[in-house]
Every structure is written in C-alpha cells, then in structure tokens.
Amino acid sequence: MERLTPEQGLALFDMDLLELGERADQDRRRRFPDNRVTFVRDRIINYTNVCITYCKFCAFYRPPGHEEAYVRSKDEIFRKVEEMLKFKGTTVMLQGGHNPDLKIDYYEDLFSSMKARFPEVYLHSLTATEVDQMALHSGLELEETLRRLKQAGLDSLPGGGAEMLVDEIRTKVAPLKTSADRWFEVHEIAHKLGMESTATMVFGFGESNEQRIQHLERLRALQDRTGGFRSFIHWSLTPDFTGLARTVPPAGHEYLRILAIARLYLDNFNHIHAGWVTEGAKLAQLALSFGADDLGSVLMEELVNSATGVAYSYNAEQIAQMIRSVGRVPAVRDSCYNVLEVLSAA
C-alpha cells in the first residue's frame, strides 16, 4: 500500500465517513485476518496527585500542600498489586502528577522493590512528562534517567502526556508542560535503550485538522527511525470539573474519523485501540469496524479521567461480551501484545 502524504491524510477529513471506515477496516483485516480483538488485564495505580504543571484540562492534580494531596506508600501500592493479581492481571501502570519532591531514587526504590516482590508483574509506567520532570528535579540527563529506571525494573512507557503534540496547542492549554520535541526525545531515547512505548492523542482543544495530521506525522516519523511504538490510542477531551471547555461538542463521528485516519496514516503501527473509557461502550464497538483491533484494558481504578466525571465499570467478561456482540473473537493479551488466552466467540 502506498504511503499517505500529509496532504492526502488531510484530505481524508473530507471523505465520506462510511467509505473511510471501510477502507480502514480493510487494512485492519489485512493485518489481523483471525478477526480477534484483544484486551489486557491491568491496573492503573496513581501513586501521587501532587503536580506543579497545572494543566487546564486536568481535574486530577492537587498543588503541593493541598489538603487532598497524597503520595501513596509502598505498602498501599503493593496491596493494590496483590488485588490485581487475584483478578489475573499482568500489568501495572504507575501514573501520577509532576511531584517535585519525588526524585529518581524514589522510583528506583519503588520499581526494584515491586519487581523483587512481584517478579511476574510487567511495569508499563510513567509518561514522558513524568520522566522529563523527574530528570529535571534529579539533575540528570534524560538518557541516564531512563537507563536507571530500566535497570530498576521499568519495562515500557505509556504514551500519556502527549495530548496534542503541537506546541501551538500545548502552550495554550498546558504552558508549563513538556514540549512536543521533549516528549519525542524521551520516547526516542527509551526506544534506543530497548524500551518500547505506546502513543496517544487527545483531541478537542480547538486544534485544526492540519495540526492533527502534524501529530500523526511526527509519530510515524519516529516509528520509522526506531520501531519502538507498540500501539496508538486517541480519545476526546473530557473537560468537566477542569478550567477548560471543549471548543466543539463531543461527537462520535469525529472520534471515528480520527481513528480511521490513524489506521491508514500510521502505516508502521500494528495496533490501534478503541477507547471505551472516554467514548463509551457503544462507540468503542463501532470503532471496531473503523480500523481498531484492540479494546485497551480493564483499567482497575483509573483516577485521572474519572476525575472529570467519566463514569465506567466494566470487568473482563463484560469487555469480552462487547467484542462478541459485534461478531469478533475476544482474546486476552499481555502488554507486549502476546495473546495469553483466546476466549469463546459465543
């Protein structure tokens, strides 16, 4: 298949939505002829909500000294890991704010202690912005920071902190946050050190379609250089209880269009997720016909998006049923996309 140019990618925003979806789904079927949709059993653990970046779209963070600010103890974190293992979970995603009091020694101790106690657990943790802030407050270069985190037990990086990887947007909604260039630098260094990662996009900040394509183009270009991205997931801005409002009303067709374009434009990415947490189960099911091959994770105890009022409660069997009801075969995977169990199709 001939690679899309940025101009051709931009033109897809004017294409008939159903025709675009069929084209994207053809690409998905070519890649995954077994008709499976995968998901992972994991747990997000928000280890701190203290943050000094003050993003306008975030309802989760608390400034230092706030009465609701916290840093979880290792014992509390380990109890949450034990609970996850009872439900056959395989992956822990540690995610927090940009807490200036937490230097790299905190993370090295936490990761190495967790790996010693739970050697079977996969650590898919820390966003590029958390790594950047950690390096800054620890007085370290990014490469040394990432190398030490890997030695302590970090297995891979999630794609959070990307939002829209265009600085014209970032400076409007999160002026203190890591720049787009720095986000890419963290991921590129991680890839060169042998750690893979995932990529994300949040839309609804008032960005143009050209800026959306710019975001995808930069992801594709880094993937060409390193091959280190495992997957892509996007979701719509959920601004409730934040200092920001969407510039356009949320619309399912907008979500589906971007998903289908991502499947076609990110030709060097194998996996495209459907985001049931922010978009809801019905739209996520539709997304499985617009190029998505994965439903992400069960997401035990996610607190960042839920702080904006997003409500959800699905267990692994309910997610499997979401997949079955659209004629696809559910399969449980690990964070490396190895299939652990193919579930019944009926």
Image: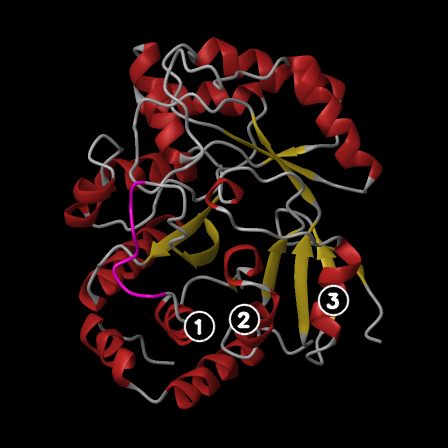
Element class at badge 1 = helix
Element class at badge 3 = strand
Q: Nearer the viewer, mark 2 or mark 3?
A: 2
Residue 47 seen in the current view: yes
- Mark count: 3
For the N terminus, the quadrant is: bottom left
Question: How far apart, in angstroms, are the residues tagged by discs 3 and 1?
Answer: 23 Å
Question: How far apart, in angstroms, are the residues tagged by discs 2 and 3?
Answer: 17 Å
Residue 123 screen position, x and y as percent: 60, 32
Q: Is residue 331 magenta?
A: no
Q: How is the image coloured?
A: secondary structure
Residue located beneath label 2 in the image: 283
Element class at badge 2 = helix
Q: Magenta span covers which residues? A: 243-249
Residue 184 screen position, x and y as percent: 30, 42
Tell me which numbered mark, 2 or 3, is placed earlier along the sequence. Answer: 2
Q: Residue flagged by tag 2: what amino acid is it?
A: Leu
Q: Which mark is residue 330?
A: 3
Callout 2 touching callout 3 (CB < 8 Å): no
What crowding class fits label 1: few (fewer than 14 Cα within 10 Å), some (14-19), or many (20 or more)?
some
What crowding class fits label 2: few (fewer than 14 Cα within 10 Å), some (14-19), or many (20 or more)?
some
Question: How far apart, in angstroms, are the residues tagged by discs 2 and 1?
Answer: 7 Å
- Identify which residue is drawn at 41% across, 76% down: 253
Q: Residue flagged by tag 3: what amino acid is it?
A: Pro
Query: Camera-side residue: 279 or 289?
Result: 279
Quadrant in the rendering for residue 181: top left
For the C terminus, the quadrant is: bottom right
Look at the magenta stretch and give its main secondary structure. loop
Q: Residue flagged by tag 1: what amino acid is it?
A: Gly
